[in-house]
Structure formats: C-alpha cells, structure tokens
Image: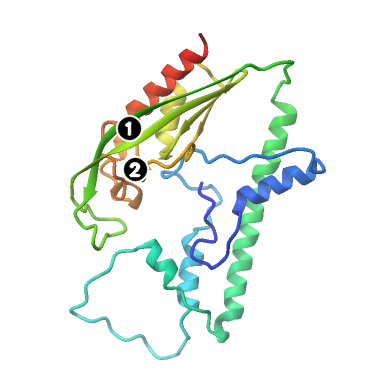
Amino acid sequence: MHPINFYLSGVISADFPGEAARYVDELFDNRTVAVFSQGASGDQNPRLAFSPSYIMRSRQRLGTPQTVAPPAPPSENRTAQGFNAAAAGSSRGAIPPENLEAYKKAIARTGEYVVMLGQMIGTTAVRLMREEIKPVDRAAIWGGQQRFTCPGRERLDAANPARENVFPGYKDGPDVNLKVGLLRIGDINFVTVNGEVYSKIALKLKDAAPASKTIVVTLANGAANSGYIYSDDAYSHLSFQVIGSRLKPGCAEGQIISTAVDLMHKAGE
C-alpha cells in the first residue's frame, strides 16, 4: 500500500506508517523504534479499502462554490486533458467558506481510516514480535548491491498524457537504471529495489529464494528512473501504473529475481 490517503487534500501526514509506528512506540513507553519499509505495490489494494481518490474528488468538488443551477454543457471542441499530479497540486484553490465544514468532515473521515490502518499494522507487528520471532544471541550481518539496466521507453502522448484505459504508444527511450540489494541479518533477508515493484514479482522472488525468511523492500537506496516496475504478465494492462512505466517488458522481472537470488547465495558463502 502507499501512504497517500491525504493525497491532494492539503494535509501533510505520516499516514498509516506514522500511526503504526506511534502505536508500537507508545505501547513500549518509547523504548523501541518502529521502522516502516515500503513493500511491493501497484497491483493490489487493502482489503478494507478507502479509495485515496475519494478525498481528491471531495477536494475538487469542495473547492468550487456549490450552486443549484445545472452545470454548463461541455464544449464540443474541447480537448480532454490528461491528469498531471504536479499541475493538480499547484492549481488547488482555497476552500470556499460555505464548503469548509464539509471539507473538515472529509478530512476527519480519512483520518479515522488512517488511524485504523495504522493500529491494525501496529498490533500485528507486536503480535508477531511476541509470538513468532525467536530471539538469538548473535546475528551476522551481510550487505551487498548490484546495478543493471533495462531498455527504456517514452510515451507518444507525453505532452498530454492519458491517465489510464488507453494504450499511448511508445518510442525507444533511455535505459532504466535499477539497483537490487540485500541486507541479511541473521537468517532474515531484506531484498531491496530502488523502484516500486509489483507484488507478483515479489512473490516470484520469494518462491525462487534459497531462504524462507525473505522480505522485499522497495523504493530503497535511491530512486530508479522507471516508474512502476510491473510484472511481465501485466504488460497489456491499461492501468496508469503500467502505461506510465518507462520500462519495456521482459527485462526487469527476471533481472530483479536472478540478482536477488545471486546475492543470497553470496551472503551464505
């Protein structure tokens, strides 16, 4: 999951990772440090989903004075504009006074959802720590990282990019630079990737790993120039994650898995 429940709302928040960390830290009187890492994402949603776009839609609606008159019909000659996050963020206007109360309610509702998610994650982490993890007297630490490149692509509609549900067409672009790393602490393997990796890639990596205790950490050690790192079988999906990715299919998935497995073998030597 992405901690973006307040996206385009005007609220800066640590979101559910902050709530989870606060829950764990306070439970142990701040004698612990709870660390959140981003896992695989892009092709999954939380089971108890509250769409992050809800607050975005509310903000857009609440940012306009409400009237009882019907909306003006769209122009027949208009050109549909694609969604640009930077432009959407910079063009936000102030909430009109007559909509401020509704805006506050929308923010409060989102906040309650964020607290719920954080407490669920926090309580699960504490349960695992108490019931599943076995303490050891010592744990060896090993770290390593490898870089590789995959063929890149550029969208043909870059001047006015569609958000999703279209195939924009592509031309060859600069190679995409990826990094895969491994931090091994005892018998636990943290595999790191400097991009947003689909969960199907993470699951395949775990299946191929020579060690059962494998955790995939994404968006780690810098930012790749890739966008989402989609799985090979998702190439035909017209979601914004896939069509916005700079990666050509058929490279990243296999390279990430094989590089991670190689690093695990080196760590075990």
Give me the residue at 45% from left, 42% from top. 41
Give me the residue at 62% from left, 18% from top. 186
Count of marks placed on residues: 2
Q: Which residue is mark 2?
A: 226
Q: Position of residue 73 (x, y in %)?
A: 28, 84
Type of amino acid under label 2: Ser
Label 1: how many residues lie within 10 Å, few (<14), some (14-19) or many (20+)? many
Secondary structure of the residue carrying tag 2 is loop
Out of 57 and 158, give the one closest to the viewer.
158
Q: Which residue is mark 1?
A: 252
In the rendered image, the vertical position of residue 108 relative to residue 187, given as above or below = below
Label 2: how many residues lie within 10 Å, few (<14), some (14-19) or many (20+)? many
Type of amino acid under label 1: Ala
Colouring method of the image: rainbow
In the rendered image, the vertical position of residue 50 relative to residue 27, given as above or below = below
Secondary structure of the residue carrying tag 1 is helix
Cβ–Cβ under 8 Å for marks 2 and 1? yes
Q: What is the spatial separation of the Cα atoms under label 2 and label 1, in whole angstroms?
A: 10 Å
Q: Position of residue 207 (x, y in %)?
A: 45, 22
